[in-house]
């Protein structure tokens, strides 16, 4: 008897594998363009739970651009209608939207894909400029220098090497954990979890005698890696079944995670409660009971 396998993202399941959709809105903030880098014009819709939004928030804070670009958060529990706002903690003071999908529909009435965060919103034109986190990271690092503290998280001399390692980390680690968690066949899961831990082993070795991925310099590559590592032991290990090892079993990856987590401007961006509630209470096909496990001991290890 054939068993119908459920998924929260049926349009992104191909032959048992999770294939992430391509971001739709890819306009860019640049000088002398329709979207110039000016203070007060743009707003970021973020989620404390989402790693793709988290890396944008970290970059915003490290560059001290949080007074230049406003930001707000959606409710961590994503409903069937997608990311939502409320009238209290997660209110939308910019547009008074009830759901983030309204921003997508206001920008493109024909939009019919999954609504994602982060979203870079133009308050002047009242449209989404970009919903691809990699693009937004680059814009925050390079296009608002007259407003930032001058920190360069993507030095010119490292950019090709960063592109290479970013691509590897994205395919095998950032997205790799989702490919494990959303796999709907044993063979696919076995293949994806093998690739994930091969990559973790490789990056752990790469970090031998290094403070960060490129030595003593903190880069966007480290931030891209960090947002997955900080979620790994408290969520992905059990929820996505990435259970061959914990990150704390890897000396270098664990040190890298703790080092970045304990940076003053990063610690405040990590909301463990919302991270855990989002994954365990939103992915009903993985965790129908919505029980959230106790992982306080891991948080204590990070803070020690």
Image (tube, rainbow, N blue to C red):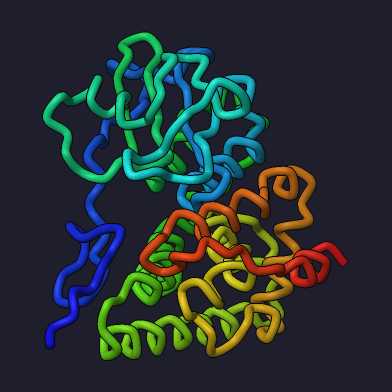
Residue 231 against residue 136 in the figure, above or below: below
Q: Position of residue 64 (x, y in %)?
A: 66, 31
Q: State which quadrant residue 196 falls in.
A: bottom left
Q: State which quadrant residue 96 falls in.
A: top left
- Going 49% across and 20% down the picture, which residue do you hit? 92
Q: Nearer the viewer, residue 178 or 174?
A: 178
Q: State which quadrant residue 109 falls in.
A: top left
Q: Position of residue 249 (x, y in %)?
A: 68, 86
Tell whether 296 sits left or right of 91.
right
Which quarter shows the C terminus?
bottom right
Q: Nearer the viewer, residue 252 or 12?
A: 12
Which quarter shows the N terminus?
bottom left
Q: Position of residue 231 (x, y in %)?
A: 59, 64
| Residue 69 at least partly seen | no
Of all residues, the one furthest to the front in this rendering is 1
Tell whether 106 sits left or right of 238.
left
Residue 230 against residue 135 in the figure, above or below: below
Of all residues, the one furthest to the top in this rendering is 124
Q: Nearer the viewer, residue 125 or 31?
A: 125
Of all residues, the one furthest to the right in this rendering is 304
| Residue 203 at least partly seen | yes
Q: Position of residue 280 (x, y in %)?
A: 52, 61
- Going 26% across and 45% down the picture, which residue do you hit? 114
Count all numbered tags in the image, as a single digit. 0
Residue 101 against residue 33 in the figure, above or below: below
- Going 16% across and 39% down the picture, which residue do you hit? 112
Tell whether 144 sits left or right of 147.
left
- Going 20% across and 77% down the picture, which residue do you hit? 16
């Amino acid at each position: 008897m054939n068993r119908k396998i459920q998924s929260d993202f049926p349009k992104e399941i191909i032959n048992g594998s999770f294939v992430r959709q391509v971001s739709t809105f890819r306009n860019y903030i640049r000088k002398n363009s329709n979207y110039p880098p000016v203070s007060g014009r743009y707003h970021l819709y973020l989620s404390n739970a989402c790693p793709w939004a988290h890396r944008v928030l970290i970059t915003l804070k490290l560059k001290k651009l949080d007074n230049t670009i406003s930001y707000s958060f959606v409710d961590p529990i994503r409903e069937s209608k997608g990311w939502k706002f409320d009238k209290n903690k997660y209110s939308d003071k910019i547009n008074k939207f009830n759901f983030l999908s309204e921003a997508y529909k206001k920008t493109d009435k024909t939009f019919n894909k999954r609504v994602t965060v982060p979203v870079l919103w133009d308050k002047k034109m009242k449209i989404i400029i970009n919903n691809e986190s990699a693009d937004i990271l680059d814009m925050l690092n390079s296009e608002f220098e007259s407003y930032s503290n001058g920190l360069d998280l993507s030095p010119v001399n490292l950019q090709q090497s960063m592109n290479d390692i970013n691509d590897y980390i994205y395919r095998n680690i950032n997205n790799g954990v989702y490919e494990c968690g959303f796999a709907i066949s044993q063979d696919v899961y076995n293949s994806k979890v093998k690739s994930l831990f091969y990559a973790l082993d490789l990056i752990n070795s790469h970090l031998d005698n290094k403070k960060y991925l490129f030595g003593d310099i903190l880069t966007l590559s480290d931030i891209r890696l960090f947002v997955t590592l900080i979620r790994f032991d408290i969520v992905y290990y059990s929820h996505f079944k990435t259970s061959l090892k914990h990150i704390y079993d890897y000396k270098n990856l664990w040190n890298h995670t703790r080092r970045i987590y304990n940076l003053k401007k990063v610690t405040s961006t990590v909301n463990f409660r919302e991270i855990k509630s989002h994954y365990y209470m939103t992915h009903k096909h993985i965790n129908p009971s919505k029980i959230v496990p106790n992982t306080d001991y891991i948080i204590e290890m990070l803070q020690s």
